Image: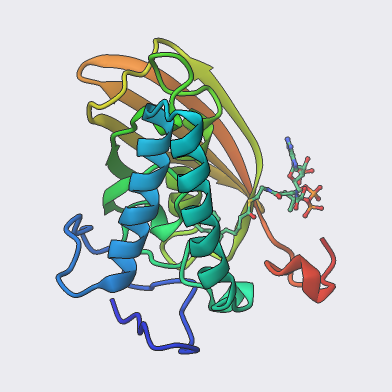
Amino acid sequence: MDVSLRPNAPIDIWNPDWNDPFDPTVEAGDEFAELVAAVRAVQEAFTRSRPDPAAAAGIAGTLRSVAQRLEELEVGEDDQIAGHRWDLAGRGQALAPPLHIDAVTETTARGRVTVGRFHAGRYAMNGGVTPLIFDEIMARLANDSGRPWARTAYLNVNFRAPAPLDVELRVEAEYLRQDGRKRFMRGTMYHGDVLVADADGLWVELKPEQTLNISEGGDV
Ligand SMILES: CCCCCCCC/C=C\CCCCCCCC(=O)SCCNC(=O)CCNC(=O)[C@H](O)C(C)(C)COP(=O)(O)OP(=O)(O)OC[C@H]1O[C@@H](n2cnc3c(N)ncnc32)[C@H](O)[C@@H]1OP(=O)(O)O
């Protein structure tokens, strides 16, 4: 994938090659991937910690100065790297669980995800995180194969069993059918042979007057 990391270089929001099998390795010398990994490491380590007040104050100061440094590098949403790196697990978006998409066909997608305590409720995956993972893989399939942009209209998630932490879960999406602008999708999440969650979703194709960038004043 051709993503330039030069400052102000245009970044394609959509990678036409993303049907290619996903390579989960972080490229040597890919400093942005290292930065995302570091942000994720902070989130996980913070969640797992119990600092005393002095340690908390010191760490807060350090993180404030990191935030200030990044604020100096702020760009518009279309130009930011986070969320636009289709080759990275979680698209380089540090909130999104690091979902590795291994394969996408016209009608199926499959991936793997492992979450830690940062994405936990109590001893298991947080109930808001499961839909995040489904939205990620189902939206990706809904918008694959040259189909025009579509947005999530609904996403109904059934929690069948607690999803364990720190182990790999299998996530699959299936393109069930299309009815005019409506695309009906299904998602499943497995731990081994155990179905931990499934989802039904509807994606609706945008009309020509609707636009992805709602701040541009399109009819949303
Ligand atoms: C870089 C960002 C990436 C983020 C994504 C991560 C995954 C990466 C993978 C891939 C990237 C793809 C990038 C996608 C772009 C970004 C996606 C989002 O932003 S999703 C955000 C959450 N979703 C919304 O914010 C939608 C808000 N809602 C709307 O905009 C509208 O309601 C919309 C477009 C969904 C439908 O509105 P209408 O006015 O265009 O359409 P009407 O005419 O009302 O409905 C058309 C048909 O759909 C049914 N319908 C609509 N909503 C329904 C619902 N909730 N339940 C049941 N049916 C519904 C209607 O009954 C109608 O059916 P009949 O044609 O009559 O048979």
Q: Is residue 145 left or right of residue 67?
A: left
Q: Residue furthest top?
A: 161
Q: Can residue 146 be seen from the camera position used here? A: yes
**Is 56 in front, or is 187?**
56
Q: Position of residue 35 (x, y in %)?
A: 34, 63
**Is 20 in front, or is 177?**
20
Q: Can residue 18 be seen from the camera position used here? A: no
Which color scheme does this rendered protein use?
rainbow
Q: Is residue 198 left or right of residue 26?
A: right
In this rendering, the answer to whether 55 lies above or below 105 is above
Q: Position of residue 26 (x, y in %)?
A: 20, 62
At x 19%, y 75%, the residue is 29
At x 46%, y 78%, the residue is 12
Q: Tell me the quarter of the image containing the C terminus.
A: bottom right
In this rendering, the answer to whether 159 lies above or below 33 is above
In this rendering, the answer to whether 94 lies above or below 202 is below
**Is 36 in front, or is 129?**
36
Q: Position of residue 168 (x, y in %)?
A: 23, 30
Q: Tell me the quarter of the image containing the N terminus.
A: bottom left
**Is 77 in front, or is 170?**
77
At x 38%, y 14%, the residue is 123
**How many marks do you count on the picture?**
0
Quarter of the figure with residue 97: top left
Q: Position of residue 142 (x, y in %)?
A: 50, 51
